[in-house]
Image: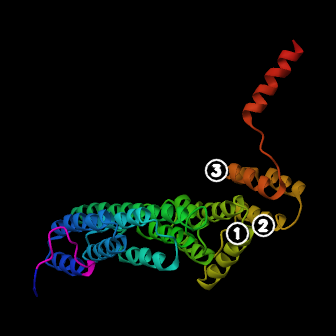
Amino acid sequence: MSGERPKRGVLPPAQENVEKLKKVVEEGNYYGAQQMYKSISARYVSAQRYSEALDIIHSGACIQLEHGQVTCGAELAVMFVDTLVKARVPYDDETLNRVRQIYNKFPQISVPQHLADDDDVQQLSEELGAAKTRVDGCSSFLKAAIRWSAEFGAPRNGSPELHVMLAEYIYSESPEVDMARVSNHFIRGNNPKKFASVLVNFMGKCYPGEDDLAISRAILMYLSSGNLRDANQLMDEIKIQVEDRQLDLPHSDLIQFITFLLQTLQRDALPLFNMLKVKYKSCVDRDPSFKELLDDIAEKFYGVRRRNPLQGMFGDIFKMMGAE
């Protein structure tokens, strides 16, 4: 009979639910829609109709984020990745593009830096809280996506494109930027030019003495993973972009050390590498992490094995016992 309702338990095509739930969101019933997105998509997952479940969740994440519902959108974004894992969806360009579509819906709002009165202080406090919510939500989503990509076909550290997205969002949206965290994801990415742009932007707003540390840390992190090519490309791009913006590259002992280090690593020159470490020890000591990065670099480029502190300690004990 025409117009007959589907039998109870029979799932309609996903598009019917996509359209229905979109209207609920557009009516402003965000919480009600959220519960429906979760419960309805769960039925498709239970029926192993994963592709349709993904369509529903993807639509929900995008439309909630479009309406500024970051918490709801981020929750559905993570559900989307969880469903990719359940369905064992391989990492490919098509699925990466769907992840990127959700990422692009996360709001990008600059936090004001100047205050005038008490009302502004209250407003700033609220905006800082909102910024933290955005960064936490987007980070949870992209970290889950990176884990999925690593398990289902991307390189061992996860999709380079996803790492770049995460680095960009943390940098642009965090009220207080952690450049070490930003660099950690750019290093696992595939876009030194974009990394250079972020570092040059950071130079214009950081405290004195932070600019050369950020640049040096980035170069050393690339080198510690054995990636001399991208380390050189990053330094070249920074010089180009600094000149284009009529800025000055920091003139410091640390930048001088990095310049000489990049030249030294082009050839088999362990004695020169060790001489550089000794000569520039005082500036290298400005960041406690640099010593460990340099140890990694020595191992990667010159095969210098680290001395295990425990081995040294036990060796000294054995020497003492032998002397006795």
Does 248 sit left or right of 171 as displayed?
right
Mark seen at residue 231: 1
Q: Which amino acid type is marked by label 2?
A: Leu
Packing grade of label 3 (10 A; few <14, some 14-19, many >=20) is few
Q: CA distance from mark 3 to mark 2?
A: 18 Å
Mark seen at residue 262: 2
Does 163 sit left or right of 42 as displayed?
right
Q: Which amino acid type is marked by label 1?
A: Ala
Please tell me which of labels 3 and 1 falls first in the chain. Answer: 1
- Residue shown at 81%/50% (left/top)? 278
Question: x, y percentage for residue 66?
Answer: 28, 77
Q: Quadrant of residue 280?
A: bottom right
Circle 1 SS class? helix
- The single residue placed furthest to the bottom in the displayed view is 2
- The single residue placed furthest to the front in the displayed view is 1
Q: Which amino acid type is marked by label 3?
A: Ser
- Residue shown at 46%/65% (left/top)? 88
Please tell me which of labels 2 and 1 falls first in the chain. Answer: 1
Q: Quadrant of the C terminus?
A: top right
Does 102 sit left or right of 269 as displayed?
left
Circle 3 SS class? helix
